[in-house]
Amino acid sequence: MSKSSVSGVQNKVVIVTGCSSGIGLATARLFLDRQALVFGIDVGAIPQKLADEHNTFTFHRANLTNSGAVDEAVSQCHQQYGRVDVLVNCAGVSDGWSSADSIHEDEWERVMAINLTVPIRLMKAVLPFMKDQKGGAIVNVASKAGVSGAAAGIAYTASKHGLVGATKNVAWRFHQDGIRCNGVLPGGVATDIASSVQMDHFDPAGFNAFFPIVQMHVSKDSEGTPVPVIGVDDVARGIAFLASDESKMINGALIPIDNAWSTI
């Protein structure tokens, strides 16, 4: 039996944000490999290799923090496919390990907008379609920092805690409409999210306070840089499971993908 025949996502219309790199790219590729129709959104350039290999991939370039950008993107997806079955809120940015006494206003606004406000706007935009269809699945990519105060700076931590709360809220509110909302909580993942840190906001004291906790989860190289053990494909598989029919009674769950870091 082929992998796709038991995947539970074939022919589903899937919106994936942050599809040009990292977890978003791996997730888009996995859904496409499992015969889903993927509407990918990113502020960056099109993932050309993915587009070349899959004619079931549609790319929409947008900065979703701009006014009206979320509604425009979701509307375009619905116009093209006539439905929206899955939303994966994957796009995110890191902070500079800033603490409550060192956070810059613009860093706070940026992290909260991308990591929390945009995902909530996307959920608001897809929910009417999912209610009309009497079904749908939302998967939010949160973080270990969504359930721990010792894994990141204050902006990232607050944004991911907020996303965890929003996930639970949406799950309960719409559980009688056939709509599921779950989240994954990745640990340290080998992506380029570190490049999203605005280094002029880097707080070395904050980093030094949190790094011992991070080090319980990751190793480090000869220069002391953290070396993540979780791959983007590991996270993508967790997302695909939560989006699939195989998890139809899982709703409001937050699944750690961190090789037991969640146990401390």
Image (cartoon, rainbow, N blue to C red):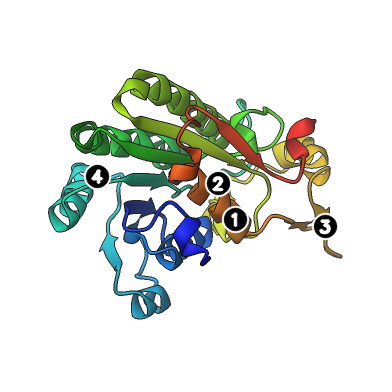
- Indicate which disc, 1 or 4, sits on the residue closer to the N terminus: 4
Secondary structure beneath label 3: strand
Q: Nearer the viewer, residue 179 or 80?
A: 179
- Is disc 2 in contact with disc 4, using a CB cutoff of under 8 Å? no
Mark 3 or mark 2: name the one nearer the start of the chain: 2
- Tell me if residue 239 can be seen: yes
Task: Tell me residue 249's x, y (percent).
Answer: 48, 31
Disc with the residue nearer the chain's start (4 vs 3) = 4
Residue nearest the observer in this picture, 214 or 34:
34
Q: CA distance from mark 2 to mark 1?
A: 7 Å
**Contact flag, marks 2 and 1 (Cβ < 8 Å):** yes
Percent x, y for residue 215? 82, 45
Indicate whether 170 appears above or below 235: above
Query: At 45% across and 67% down in the image, what residue appears?
Result: 33
Mark 2 vs 1, N-terminal side:
2
- Side of 65 where 69 appears, left or right: left
Q: Which mark is residue 70?
A: 4
- Of badges 2 and 4, the one in the foreground is 4
Amino acid type of the residue tagged 4 in the rendering: Val
Give the label on residue 94, or none. 2
Q: Which quarter of the figure has residue 166?
A: top left
Amino acid marked by disc 3 = Lys
- Give the residue at mark 3: 220
- Give the answer, above or below, for where 148 lies relative to 35: above
The reply to whether discs 1 and 3 touch (Cβ–Cβ < 8 Å) is: no
